[in-house]
Image (cartoon, helix red, strand yellow):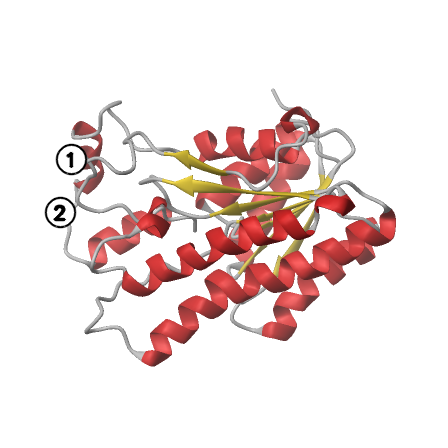
Amino acid sequence: MSRLDGKVLVITGSTQGVGEGIALQAARNGAEGIVICGRNEEAGRKVAAAVEEIGAASLFVEVDLHDVEATRNVLAACDEKFGRVDGLVNSAAMTTRGTLASTTVELWDYLFAVNVRAPFLLTQDAVTIMKREGISGSIVNIISVAAYCGLPHIAAYSATKGALATFTKNCANGLLNDTIRVNGIMLGWTDTPNEDVVQKQQGSPSDWLDIGEKDSPFGRLLKPLDVGHLACFLLSDDSGVMTGSLIDQAQRVVGTLSMPADITGDAV
């Protein structure tokens, strides 16, 4: 278990799915405080209560990451309550489908605002606090194997994840002298509430999960807890001086012909 004793973390998209899994695992690993943020207040307060029941202090911040001012408020709220931040997880993302032909300018801009601009703003603000407090912090970006190419019907989403992968490495290089580490998780197909919604919206059968898991090499999709274990390792001192790494967390080897029909790397 990667220990996070005394650390204060901000985890976006943590009202459900991967972000929630990371938040709960961070609490189990001894985090002192966790900022839960997302658009759903009811779900967010429920996760915050679960975090507190485990033993960590929590704060829920309602935020639409498409809104610049609201996004800027996330780290400000963390700073006001805890006076520090030791780790940031950029987990929130929109996975709206669209091919080259069907993707509108509005959809392209919206996905880049949420999936790329928001992590940029949050990283900027987190690093400002870390530098002020002399903290050797850790930032973890939840990316996707779609960043390597992606399927035709997730053109804009794939592009955003490619941008976030490059941003991860660029930040890691730029923050070396501040001993602030930045790493990314290239997530494969994951069983989350949002993935269920998206699959049904695109006409998949109601038992899509059973079908997908049956066809998976290990007999199941990735689960939020899987990501929680890896994210907590990267947030903790156990990962040492590791920075600028993009880790494939998928059960198929990228570059082979064994990829499934629909991998989004959904992190919502």
> Which tag, 1 or 2, sits closer to the chain's start?
2
Residue 200's disc is none
Quarter-of-image position of residue 106: bottom left
Name of the residue lying farthest toward the bottom = 105
Q: Secondary structure at mark 2?
A: loop
Residue carrying label 2: 205
Q: Residues within 10 Å of mark 1 (few under 14, many from 20)?
A: few
> Is any part of residue 243 visible from this angle?
yes
Find out whether the residues at labels 1 and 2 contact each other: C-beta distance under 8 Å.
yes
Residue carrying label 1: 211
For residue 114, side relative to residue 259 (left or right): right
Q: Residue at x 22, y 54 (%)?
A: 151
- Which x, y percent locates residue 9? 68, 44
- Which x, y percent locates residue 81? 80, 53
Q: Is residue 158 above or below residue 111?
A: above
Position of the N terminus by quadrant: top right
| Closest to the observer, 238 or 244 | 244
Which amino acid does the dot numbered 1 rest on?
Ile
